[in-house]
Amino acid sequence: MAWFRVDDQLHGHPKARQAGLAAMGLWSLAGSYSASYGLAGDVPAHYVAGWPNGRKLAQALVACGLWETTENGWRFHDWDDYQPSADEIEEARAAARRRQREHRQKLRSQRDNQETK
């Protein structure tokens, strides 16, 4: 599972205050969407259009500098500076799979050792 990182100082950032609560709601959900689908900060127009006043809220995010307009929708400003790359996410997932496999092997080994006693 990928995570969308949000700075714990976002609540007081001037851009967030300028965008407003509704636009920041879209910003948060769109960040989760982009991270979940490996879109690297891109937000498709169809996703935004699916929310009430989505295009208007997107324009508020552009106006304050949190998003940039693209050919197919929008993109988070400086996504790559704050969010993990697709490669980093896959490395973390692979490491988690290895840890889980090793843990299961250890449990099986312990169970087998107890059965042979």
Image (cartoon, rainbow, N blue to C red):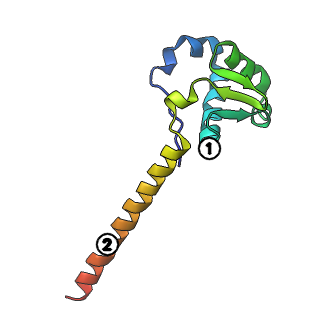
Residue depicted at 62% across the width and 11% down the height? 18
Residue 16 place in picture, x, y as percent? 58, 16
- Residue 79, compared with residue 107, is above or below; it is above
**Residue on which disc 2 sits:** 107
Left or right, 100 with respect to 54, comes to: left
Image-quadrant location for residue 36: top right
Image-quadrant location for residue 27: top right
Mark 1, other Cα within 10 Å: few <14 / some 14–19 / many ≥20: some
Q: CA distance from mark 1 to mark 2?
A: 34 Å
Residue 114 place in picture, x, y as percent? 23, 82
Residue depicted at 53% across the width and 49% down the height? 1
Amino acid, disc 2:
Leu
- Residue 25, compared with residue 109, is above or below; it is above
Foreground: 25 or 112? 112
Q: Is residue 53 visible?
A: no
Foreground: 83 or 32? 83
**Residue on which disc 1 sits:** 38
Foreground: 40 or 60? 40
Residue 74 place in picture, x, y as percent? 72, 28
Q: Is residue 69 visible?
A: yes
Left or right, 65 with respect to 94, comes to: right
Residue depicted at 40% across the width and 61% down the height? 98
Mark 2, other Cα within 10 Å: few <14 / some 14–19 / many ≥20: few
